[in-house]
Image (cartoon, rainbow, N blue to C red):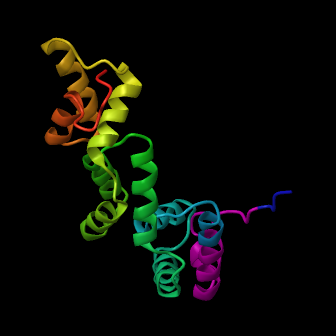
Amino acid sequence: MRRARPEPLAAGEAGTASPADQEQAARTAAFALLAGRDFSRAELAGRLARKGHAAAAVTAVLDSLVAEGVLREERYAGQFVNQRAGRGKGPLRIRMELGDKGVARETVDSALGEAGADWVRAAREARRRKFGAALPEGARERARQARFLQYRGFTADQIRAALGPAEDDDDPR
């Protein structure tokens, strides 16, 4: 059974509540959102602002959540990298998506480094799932597959390796 969510604050209503009440309402909303999944700080701030919470209350709540260890961008970035890599996305695309979500560049670099993903293998798997096991024949098909991998966020070196025969493949496909 789902609990009823508190009504969002109407325009102008945030000014009538005391700062402590505003902060408590923002904290409750933040915990409700974080119960579903992790968020980046910027993403959570945007969600709370759209719900009508005062900017000062949102900032105070986010600062306290970070201090308490409830809101951790490193954890969020690591989970995001693992999830997207599992879906066949490359490091460039993941870096861009995390940047769009307001995650600091250093945090993104750290998460990508700690992921331990074999990006060449991931590019090969993404290519195989989309186009089959046979390597591309002809420049036109090779370019088509390279564009697909580029869109997925793989580097030029990773794409070249994925479009060529695998060194560890005993079974030439």
Q: Nearer the viewer, residue 85 or 56?
A: 85
Magenta span covers which residues? Answer: 5-29
Residue 89 position, x and y percent, is: 35, 42
Quadrant in which the N terminus appears: bottom right
Closer to us: 118 or 81: 118
As displayed, is residue 73 above or below residue 65? above
The C terminus - image quarter = top left
Q: Is residue 104 left or right of residue 37?
A: left
110 left or right of 130? left
Residue 21 counted in the magenta span: yes
Q: Residue at x 59, y 67 (%)?
A: 34
Q: Residue furthest front?
A: 170
Magenta stretch: includes residue 144: no
The x and y percentages for residue 155 are 18, 42
Reply above or below: 47 against 94: below
Name which quarter of the figure residue 126 lies in: top left
Residue 125 placement (x, y as % from top left): 37, 34
75 shown above or below 83: below
- Tally of marks: 0
Identify which residue, 62 or 106, lies in the foreground. Answer: 106
Q: Which residue occupies the extreme right position in the image?
A: 1
- Left or right of 118 on screen, residue 31: right
Q: Quadrant of residue 154?
A: top left
Q: Residue at x 65, y 63 (%)?
A: 8
Residue 25 at what x, y percent from top left?
Answer: 64, 76
Could you say which is closer to the camera, residue 88 or residue 36?
88
